[in-house]
Amino acid sequence: MAFLLAQLGAHAAGRFAERIAGLDLTPAQAGLLRLLARTPGRSQRELAGDLGMPPSRFVPFADKLEERGLIERRRNPDDRRLYALHLTPEGFGLLGALREVATAHEEQTCQALSPEEHEQLGALLRRVAEQQGLTPGVHPGYRSVR
Amino acid sequence: MAFLLAQLGAHAAGRFAERIAGLDLTPAQAGLLRLLARTPGRSQRELAGDLGMPPSRFVPFADKLEERGLIERRRNPDDRRLYALHLTPEGFGLLGALREVATAHEEQTCQALSPEEHEQLGALLRRVAEQQGLTPGVHPGYRSVR
DNA sequence: TATTGTTATACTCTATAACTATA
DNA sequence: TATAGTTATAGAGTATAACAATA
């Protein structure tokens, strides 16, 4: 059953990656946008840690999103070594589109289940995830950026 | 919930990879051993396709397992272009160890659930996997070999 | 001296496309 | 000519470690 979980997880992640490719986003990029929506203003090192990538890789990764006008680097006046990363209005707009894609993906993935079963599955998975010590909303599978 | 599935799947896959590293196996290598146990004698191209890797990458991949004496390349007398791949007795032995690891991994992953809930979760996941068209026992997440 | 962000670099992984041998 | 296996190779992705600015 753990194997099924891994297999199905890879499948769901792959299909989601295909969908957001239509928004010109990779899973890791979508992850950063979600992270910034939840807790804005954090440093690059913190964010890199959450996404499971070394700081050196985070720099060009954030560069691309900044060039596209989706995120913004603001200097922290109290400690000028740090940047505080924020979503731009364009970033918030794309986040909305991302949520629509996620909803469609959710429905497509759980087609086989009734609403009650869907709910039941979610409850069981949340229990397992909590016991396994997973942080909600962040997963370590962003090793690859492409 | 699809996100939870992907997150938990990546977690389970990662923990499993850690466990089988103790047997000096990668997930892709374990996948090939399981594949050969189920349907022996297939060609390298077929197996490469199932594992989601190009034939050129399959060659050094199989070389390592052959050097370790876990698998065997047998020439097909009817068509001498093909190899027929088989597990050696050592390969079967390691497969047994692999199954023990998988059992321990299963228990560790589903600690949070009662036996009834465990069964229930498995049933729901199987339904979703079938509807999504997944082949039992094979998953496309073997992109990485290391 | 320690930490943030950055850059340089060496290394691994990968896919594509040639090559050979068999058919 | 087509296909299985193999090899060569160029490109992408990666982590490590050095660096500059600030604390």
Image: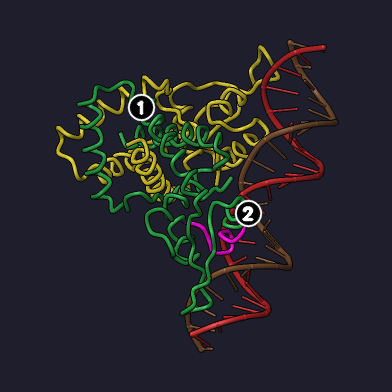
Chain colours: A green, B yellow, C brown, D red
Residue depicted at 60% across the width and 39% down the height: B61
Q: Is residue B93 visible?
A: no
Residue B20 at least partly seen:
yes
Between disc 1 and disc 2, whose residue precedes?
A: 2
Amino acid at pointer 2: Glu
C-alpha gap between disc 1 and disc 2: 33 Å
Secondary structure category for the residue under label 2: helix
Residue B29: percent from left, percent from top? 50, 39
| Quarter where residue B92 is shown | top left
Q: Work out which quarter of the rendered image holds the C terminus of chain A and state it.
A: top right
Is A57 one of the magenta-colored residues? yes
Decide: is B31 above or below C4. above
Residues drawn in magenta: A52-60
Image mark for residue A67: 2
Q: Position of residue A37 (x, y in %)?
A: 41, 53
Dot in front, 1 or 2: 2
Q: Which residue is disc 1 drawn over?
A: A107
Output the chain of dot 1: A
Q: Residue furthest front?
A: A89
